[in-house]
Image (cartoon, rainbow, N blue to C red):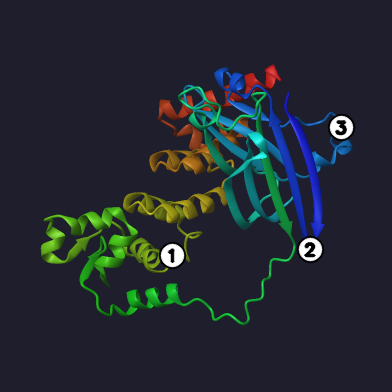
Amino acid sequence: MSNLNYTTRTEGQTKINTIIWTVPNFVNLLENKSTREFRTEKPKDPGADPIYSRFHLKMQFLGRDNDIIEIYYLSPIPVFLKSILTVCLKRFEERSIVIKEYHTVQANKWQYLATLFKRDITGFDGRDIFLLNDGSLRLKFQFIVTNDIKVDYSNVPEAQLSNDFENLLNNGLFSDITMKSAEGNEYKVHKAVLASRSVVLKAHFEHNTTECHTNIVESPLESEVLTEVLTFIYSDKAPRVDDMPEKLLAAADFYELSRLKSLCEEALHKKLTVENAIETLQLADLHSAKILKQLTLEFIKDGQAKLITKTEGWAKVKSVELIKTIYNYIMTDDVEADIK
C-alpha cells in the first residue's frame, strides 16, 4: 500500500499540482519478480477524492530482475503542462530527476516521464541511495498546468539559426560533397554539417572510404524522404513528419537521428487505431522504437485486444515472437489485476 500526499496552489493562470508518492519497503517490491507494474490506487468513489480527478501515476518494471523502473502519469483531461520529478532523499535532501518543459498532454493516455535504475535505488555495496531511512521510496511530482501558453517575446529578435542553415542547404553555398538519392537526384551538402548530426554519415568521412575519394554519398532513401532528412539535419525541423512518419522513422533509424526518430514515434502514436495497431507494433519493433512499442502495447492491452485480433493486420502476423510479446504483456497485466 502506497501513500499519496497531494497539494495544489494557483498563481495567476498557472496551477501547480504537487504529488508526493511514498512506496514503503520498495526493495521488497523490486525483489518480487512477479510484479511488473505498480499504480496509485483509485478510491472506490473517485468523486470523493480530488487527487484522482487530476493525475494518476504508475511504475513499469522492466528487465529480468526489475532492473529498470519507468515512471508514467495520466491526466483525465487535455492539459498544457510542465512536469518535474524529484527523488526525496535522507536528511531532507532532494535530487531532481527530470524536468520536461511545457507541452500538450492528451487525455487518458499514459505519458512517459522518467526512468530509474535498480542500481541507483540500492548501490552495489549495499548502500541505499534513493531510499529513506525506513526503506521507502519517495517521489515528488510537480505538474505545472497553465492556460497562458502565449509568451511575449516582442523585444527579442526571432532566432534565425535554423533558417540560415536551411538556406545553406537550399542554395548549396560552399558545399563540399554531393549526396544522391535512390533515384539519382543530387543534393549539394556539407561534410561538417552531416558529420556533426549523424554518426553514420560521419563514418563516411573518417576513414579511407569511397566517399572520401569521390566526395559523393549514395543514399538508399528516395528523394521525397531524403529531402526531409536533410531538412531535419540542417534545420532541426521535420515539416512533413505527420505525412510520412513510417518512412521517416526508417530513415531516422538508418542514420541514427534520435530526435527525428522521437518525432516520428510521436506522430505514429497520434495516428494509432485498432486497425493499424499491429502494423505500428511491427514497425516499432523493426526500428527499435522503444517508446512507440511501449505505447502501442499499452494501447492493445487497454481494452483493445479482442478488437485487434479481428483486424486484417492480425490475420497477416507471421512473427511468433510478436504474438508472444503481446500475449505476455496482456497476461502479466491480468495476473497483477487479479492480485490487486
Pointer 3 with pointer 1, Cβ within 8 A = no
Closer to the chain start, of discs 3 and 1, is: 3
- Mark 3 to mark 1: distance in Å? 47 Å
Q: Disc 1 marks which amino acid?
A: Asp
Question: Which residue is drawn at the image coordinates 65% and 44% (left, top)?
Answer: 109
- Image quadrant holding the N terminus, namely top right
* Camera-nearest label, 3 or 2: 2
Q: Label 3, secondary structure: give it.
A: loop
Q: Which residue corresponds to mark 2? A: 13
The residue closer to the viewer here, 258 or 8, is 8
Q: Amino acid at mark 2?
A: Gln
What residue is at 89 percent from the left and 36 percent from the top? 48
Specify which label sits upstream in the sequence, 3 or 2: 2
Crowding at dot 1, Cα within 10 Å, few <14 / some 14-19 / many 20+, comes out as some
Residue 115 image point, x, y percent:
53, 39
Residue wearing tag 3? 45
Query: With 328 as the anchor, is 282 left or right in this view?
Result: left
